[in-house]
Image: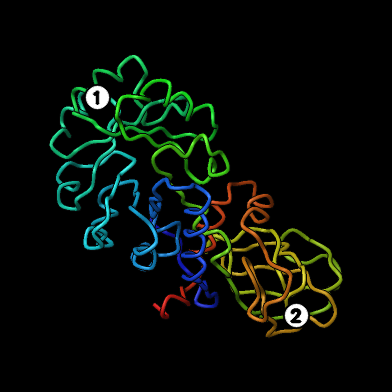
Amino acid sequence: MRPMPASAHVTVHIDLDRVRANAADVRRRVRGAEVHAVVKADAYGLGARVVARALREVIDGFVVFDAREAIEVGLAELGKPILALGPSDPTACAEGRVRPAVWDVPSAAAMRALGPVLSVDTGMQRFGCPVEQVEQALKAGGCREAFTHGIRVEQARRLVELLGGRGLRLHAAGSALLDEPEAHLDLVRPGLALYRGAVSVRTRLVEARDTRGPAGYTGFTARRHGVILAGYSNGLRPGPCLVNGRRRRVREVGMQSAFVELEPGDDAGAEVTLLGAPSSGGAEIVREEEVASAWGCTPHNALLHLCGSGKRAYGGHGGM
């Protein structure tokens, strides 16, 4: 599937200092466990090449989904361990210096020379080795490391129950389990926790007027409304926003434009914040979870779509 086009009228502001601060905060919370940054899907849309280099000094390794992601952004040149969580071609793993995840006996044997990491199914039922095959797969791949895809602490406990005390390197915690010390094990794999609050997506009103009767395709009603030049072709959906730093809503989304509900004093040219903080600062921000709730999706989904809605602008970490 091809990525959605970015609107030339939307800017995605990415604060690399905030990304680094988030990583430092994760390190403090996990008390000695290694921190391996998940930069799959182009670092959730923030731009993996830039983000990985900003994180290099404050994390211990990187995690991708496919080894080709690591090759595309030159992760190997950063000198950190790289793990691919999903299916990967062995040639790409060798080229990108990526350790592949394996989850059955044949793949473990095929990847043995690449130092594979065994993914154990503790309930996710996706890319995980069934419990009854774990011993055979460990042996076939010569695996010295194992992990599970977990969102509940019980899944981390199950991994330890199966493989603890055997000298294997174990990990289970992504962002969802960072508040569970029992799940930290030897390393953690944060994704959203690194990027939360680091992105602000902004545009401007190109029209503003008092509403006269039903408006738009859906016939919505409002006291006043305006138009921005971003639509569902750019990943936008109806939901929260700020206009001039004050709470408003995106009421209806078209292909390349959207209606925003306004109040008196909101005029053409006013800044509209679709995610994060307005350029003027202030107490009001639009959080990933708030957008996700309105959109009926996960915060990861909302972040990825809004990061792709416009052109990127990086700040912090030396203005990379």
How would you rate the neighbour count of disc 2 (Cα within 10 Å): few for under 14, some for 14-19, many for 20 or more? many
- Can residue 233 be spotted in the picture? no
- Can residue 210 be spotted in the picture? yes
In the picture of the structure, the residue carrying the numbered disc 1 is 138
Looking at the image, residue 151 sits to the left or right of residue 93; the answer is right
293 relative to 148, above or below: below
In percent of the image, x 29 and y 34: which residue is there?
Answer: 145
Residue 95 at x, y percent in the picture? 15, 52
Q: Give whichever of 3, 287 is nearer the camera.
A: 287
Q: Give whichever of 138, 185 is nearer the camera.
A: 185
In percent of the image, x 37 and y 62: which residue is there?
Answer: 48
How would you rate the neighbour count of disc 1 (Cα within 10 Å): few for under 14, some for 14-19, many for 20 or more? many
The part of the image, by quadrant, that contains residue 220 is bottom right
235 relative to 134, above or below: below
Q: Amino acid at mark 1?
A: Leu
In the picture of the structure, the residue carrying the numbered disc 2 is 208
Looking at the image, residue 254 sits to the left or right of residue 15; the answer is right
The part of the image, by quadrant, that contains residue 206 is bottom right
